Amino acid sequence: MYDLARKARNLNAVPLAVIHALWASILLAYSESDAEDTIFGSIAGGCASESLEHTVGPTFTVVHKQRALPVLVSLLSSWSNTEVKHRLLADAGLAPKLLYHGPLGSSTDVPSYGSLRMVVMEEAEGTNAFVLYQDREVLDLFLASVREAVRELHAYGFVFGDLRRQNIMVSPGGKVKLIDFDWAGKDGEAMYPIRMSNKIRWAPGVGAMEKMYKAHDNFMIDRL
């Protein structure tokens, strides 16, 4: 059986969403393996939203038929500096395991589509914190787990940046994992994106193209 990580690299995706209609078209996923090892997918998302503003194609759930392990596949245009932060937390069990980040094609005869990158990660088990705590107070255990994850990131000099409930997954056992690392960057060096929602109560000092600081994350935790 092919290793799932290597299989993810062999996915050849045709980004019709980029060429024809952003967010609306179909992303086709292929596999180079035999039929019994086929990787297949279905669209899990693709609508324009603040949490997906850097995504340029639909998000796919992809399943290996024999191993039945679901992963997520996304096409992103601005993820080149995000991989290291994701891997740091994934190694600590505080983010979904990253299986692949790189060009859409794995061979020279497959179009590269410029700076477009494919991200393949394990699908986080559990419920989005925005949904889980929509009608009730957050638990102390939840807040403590989020602080632990953020401390791990801060210890390496990074800021998460977009620390909202939408970007936190909670497992059935209460374990927290952070998702969506698009904004994450170096403390005091990285800057917030030029496009930010004015409907969110951000930490003091947060704004479009302003520098990111660890204190901003701590403020957002207190608001969860």
Image (cartoon, rainbow, N blue to C red):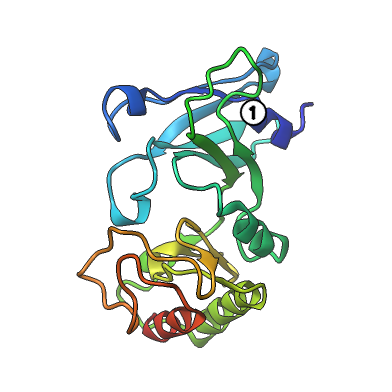
- Image: 155 above or below 65: below
* Residue 165 visible somewhere in the drawing: yes
Instruction: Name the residue nearer the viewer: 9 or 82.
Output: 82
Q: Which image quarter: residue 145?
A: bottom right
Residue 76 position within the rendered picture, expressed as x and y whole percent measured from the top left: 45, 41
* Residue 170 visible somewhere in the drawing: no
What is the tally of numbered marks visible in this picture? 1
Among all residues in the image, which is located at the extreme right? 1
Residue at point 30%, 56% (across, down): 50
- Image: 45 above or below 27: below
- Image: 41 above or below 126: above
Instruction: Name the residue nearer the viewer: 135 or 54.
Output: 54
Left or right side of 45 for 172: right
Residue at point 62%, 74% (across, down): 157
Residue type, mark 1 in image: Lys
On-image quarter of the C terminus: bottom left
- Image: 202 above or below 39: below
Within-10-Å neighbours for mark 1: few <14, some 14–19, many 20+: some
Residue 218 position within the rendered picture, expressed as x and y whole percent measured from the top left: 47, 84
Left or right side of 99 for 144: left
Secondary structure at numbered mark 1: loop
Kindly identify which residue carries mark 1.
65
Residue 14 position within the rendered picture, expressed as x and y whole percent measured from the top left: 45, 21
Left or right side of 1 for 134: left
Residue 164 position within the rendered picture, expressed as x and y whole percent measured from the top left: 39, 70
Residue at point 27%, 78% (across, down): 201
Among all residues in the image, which is located at the extreme left? 199
On-image quarter of the N terminus: top right
Instruction: Name the residue nearer the viewer: 166 or 206.
Output: 206
